[in-house]
Image (spheres, rainbow, N blue to C red):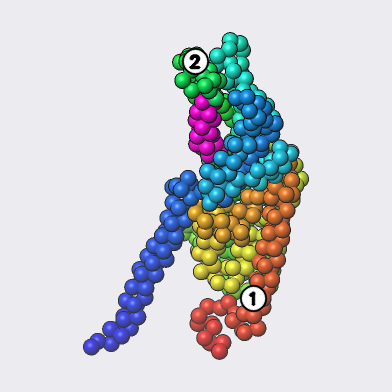
Amino acid sequence: MTTDEPADRPVRHLRLRGWIAPIAVVTLLMALLATMYLAYVVNPTKNLHDFPVALVNQDDGDVLGDKPANVGNQITEALVANLPSDKIDLHVVGFAEAQRQLRQGHAYGAIVIPSDFTKRLAILGAAGVVPGAVEQPVITVHTNPRAGSFATAVMQRIADEALSRVDETVGKQLIDTVHAKLQPSPGTPGTELAGASQLMLAHPIQVVVAPYRPLPDGTGQGLSAFFYTLLVLLAGFTGAMTIHSMTDSALGFAPTEYGPWYVHYPSAPISRFRTLLLKWAILAVTAPIVSALFLGVATLLDVPLDHPLALFLYCVLAIMAVGVTALSVLAAFGTAGLLVNLILFIVLGLPSSGGTVPIEATPEYFAWLATFEPMHQVFLGVRSILYFNANGAAGLYRGTGMAVLGLAIGLLGGAVVTRFYDRKGLQRKPAVAAQSGR
């Protein structure tokens, strides 16, 4: 055996680890990405659960076929019984309450049966055999475009499927009523119902789809809140990564390399805790500048901004909460903190944000993620400011509270971990220096 072989063996072992470790990490990360992102979007109808819809029945009733009737009540009972409760969270409420839920984004749509519904139905039945002008009974479906464009599409599909069955059932009932009136007693010859009248009575209900408080131009059909949220998350996340790497380079804890230029400054005599404080301070200066920059770009692009000050302040808070937490994760885990932050803020955050596909149209574990994932909380706050008149109940209270909580967790966690490392003497030194200092 030659003398070089033992020295060469660790190098071969290191080369093997250098291949296996990155391949394994990338493979696992991509598996998580594929699972999260494809499950998020491939089958929203199948994944539907707890989708909030308001149902308003204002029908006063009337006489139908010489008998008192309230078809609105029958439709309400049929919708409550037939709409799958595990998919649709149907709330039978008054009109004022339905408006409140739509204004606050707590309902994705409302089905409204008007007060004269049975009366118009009775007139339509009479018009089948009596000449004269007539109007179809109307059911209005209010969508909520401010809650998201995809939520609007899901609401329309639900309404189409449910009300088409209602239309057929009511049409059959109306034809039977008219036939009974034309043929008063069994065995007695009566008047035949004209084919055109029978066709009209078979589908008596006119369904009108109307957006509740349509979005103005410059909102990307309800997507501007999501992309503004994405900007805020990236400002905190990538901002923290940039501040972390550039500060470490300046302090000599990591080399600085730009193209062929390479320099590694001597390590500064500074503790982990003070290093983290410095990075937090840089982030605190950066956050309002970036938030103002976003606001300026949005203004130049004619994005409707009814509450610019609220948007500016909220985004400063959100950038600080995300950035402080990301810097604390890096201080705690080092290089591995890059992956932790990527998974926490991006991989798990995007599909559970509710910014494109509503949470109620994704697998149920996304709803669990949305209870704490930062992107969903920030989205609720930004959407409330941009679309819901900065209404606290529409998500601003929750978004602000969760941002404050996240900021507190980031500050406390970072301080505790770095102070612990400092007290244990776990200094940031090269391996040779660390071994010689023992």
The residue under the point 56% across, 56% down is: 367
Secondary structure, mark 2, is loop
Q: Which mark is on residue 418?
A: 1
Name which residue type carries label 1. Thr
Secondary structure, mark 1, is helix
The reply to whether residue 203 is visible in this rendering is no
Q: Main secondary structure of the magenta part?
A: helix
**Left or right, residue 402 beside residue 4:** right
Q: Count neighbours of disc 1 (C-alpha within 10 A) and say few if under 14, some if 14 to 19, many if 20 or more.
A: many
Give the quadrant of the C terminus. Answer: bottom right
State which region is magenta. 155-176
**Left or right, residue 373 beside residue 292:** left
Instruction: Give the number of the mark in front: 1 or 2.
Output: 2
The residue under the point 64% across, 32% down is: 70
The disc, 1 or 2, on the residue closer to the chain's N-terminal end is: 2
Name which residue type carries label 2. Gly
Asked if the stretch drawn in magenta spans residue 172, the answer is: yes
Q: Label 2, on which residue? A: 190
The residue under the point 34% across, 77% down is: 13
